[in-house]
Image (spheres, rainbow, N blue to C red):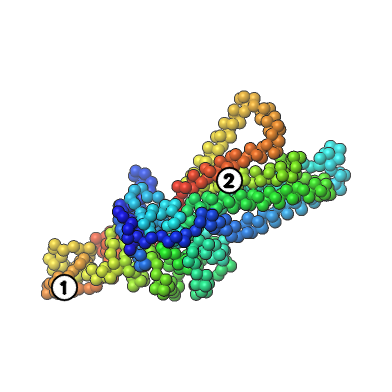
Amino acid sequence: MSVIRVQNLSKRYGRSSGAVQAVAEASFTLDENRIHGLLGRNGAGKTTLMQLLTGQEFADHGTIEIFGENPVENARVLDRVCFIKESQRYPDDFRVHHVLSTAPRFFADWDADFADELVERFRVPVKRRMKKLSRGQLSAVGVIVGLASRAPLTFFDEPYLGLDAVARQLFYDVLLADYSEHPRTVVLSTHLIDEVSNLLEHVLVIDEGRIVIDADADELRGSAIDVVGTRTTVEAFTAGREVLHRAHLGSLATATIAGLDEAGRAEARAAGLELEPVSLQQLVVRTTGDTPGGPADRTNGGRA
Amino acid sequence: MSAVDAPTIPHATATPAARAWRIVRLLTANPATTVGWPLGILTLIFVMNWTVWWLLTRAVGPIGDGETPDGVRFNGAVSFIFVYMLVVAVQAANQSFPLALGYGSTRRAFSAGSALAFTLLALGYATLLTIGAWFEELTSGWGLHGNFFRTIYFATDAGWPAQWWIYFCWFVFFFFTGTIFAAVFVRWRATGLSTAFALLGLLVVGLLAALILSDGWAALGETLAALGPLGVASLALVPGVLAAVVGHLLLRRATPRS
């Protein structure tokens, strides 16, 4: 069963020369009760896409169905959705406890005990003003609302920003544990791909507004492989195959090949090439990076 | 594309009234902003005013006699609370709107909820000011012929319900005028607000020009005098309600930005 169906969705900001195509002809479906990763570089269109899916932003064209209906101004859909943005604004006069006292009114399945437990575990100062929170504490509040809301469709927008390694691990652990107890559909936007790759069941990769990968995480993990060897051998081997990425250093070359089957692997080994697995993160970097001769790891650039 | 295999939405969704009420609670989550501070400041202003009246009485004898038979009727102090509520409305729409949408509220519910919250606050504050005005009359101007609540722009002799109505209308006017500017800001940010103020400025200048060119000042003065505080306040309800409607129409296509 699909919770989200998107067809030919486009959103553009600005006009003529300065226009930015935030989302371009995106089509995909996301199944119910799974953890979906929305991966991509900064400015790739992740937040815009989530704003479109939650009716906060208006599409230029295309259709969106959430729980089978258009989400825009649709209370029946939005009552089941939680989307705390990475850059979520809170009223200036709000302290943490004001967030925790207002949120339950919006979510039918809110679990107050769970929220209290999370406040303690994330060490969030409930009496502090939202404006005075550190980046990490602010993220933690978003994470707590997202988790405790138990909304049937929950979006987490780069929820780890400013969180230390311990708190990030805590988030991943709690998300997984709570999700297995209370199955729901989770969309997690992130560029820390390696950290969450074991969490994700399905992956969408967006680049310059386009969906470039839409696949199950398991399938992706095994789908691409690096072949390493001398330049001439690599070039000979890759001729006629789908190459996602190439890099070379002197006479050595590496090529990332999509969907190399067992026969192909044997052939590569016979040609004297080494085979290396490609992590989800590397795969995303190679699919969305733009420098042909070297690594284009800008997905971890971080936002100021 | 069919929605046959899409999960069906369960029946247990909130009623429109419940959705609006959430917004009321969101806007009043911190009562210090909507009740504590304004009342505190109003009390402080009152104490300062009373002290000035007392000093005046000591220096020049009782006010409310001779040249000022009605006491000091010009006093802008209570106007503070109206302007404060305009700011409350601006902040509410600007700062709570993004959070409400993140919580899964519709814009419609947000408009309905904020209208409800502002109307309730207007009811409460109008009642409070009316009680103040009643007490003011009972004590002959707080013992000093001072007018704090029954200043010339608000006072009426048409009875306490009319007095209450005057306050109520002005609160509605200020709250919803606030929402319209907030909505402009939420939708078009600073550029929109500057443009809106520029247009408003042009409108005011235009009206002034029209008044001057047509020698309409006297007519305007007469009209206002004829309307009296009660008539003028009732009239202020019209732009207030209009602002509520326009504010919602603007928010309807607004996207929260960070």
Looking at the picture, does residue A228 appear above or below residue B82?
below
Q: Residue furthest right?
A: B61
Looking at the picture, does residue B118 appear above or below residue A235?
above
Q: Is residue A44 visible?
A: no
Amino acid carrying mark 2 in the image: Phe
Residue at 51% in and 54% down:
B16
Mark 1 vs mark 2: same chain?
A: no
Disc 1 sits on a residue from what chain?
A
Residue at 23% in and 63% down:
A245
Disc 2 sits on a residue from what chain?
B
Q: CA distance from mark 1 to mark 2?
A: 69 Å
Q: Residue furthest front?
A: B11
B56 to the left or right of A234: right
Closer to viewer: mark 1 or mark 2? 2
B80 to the left or right of B181: right
Residue at 63% in and 52% down:
B121
Looking at the picture, does residue A211 appear above or below residue B158?
below
Q: Position of residue A224 (x, y in %)?
A: 23, 68
Residue A149's disc number: none
Q: Position of residue A236 (x, y in %)?
A: 12, 66
Q: Quadrant of the C terminus of chain A?
A: bottom left
Q: Position of residue A297 (x, y in %)?
A: 32, 64
Mark 2 falls on what kind of element? helix
B140 to the left or right of A232: right
Depth check, front residue: A283 or A185: A185
Residue B176's disc number: 2
How busy is the neighbourhood of tag 2: few (under 14 within 10 Å), some, or many (20 plus)?
many
- Residue topped by disc 1: A262
The quadrant in which residue A216 appears is: bottom left
Amino acid carrying mark 1 in the image: Glu
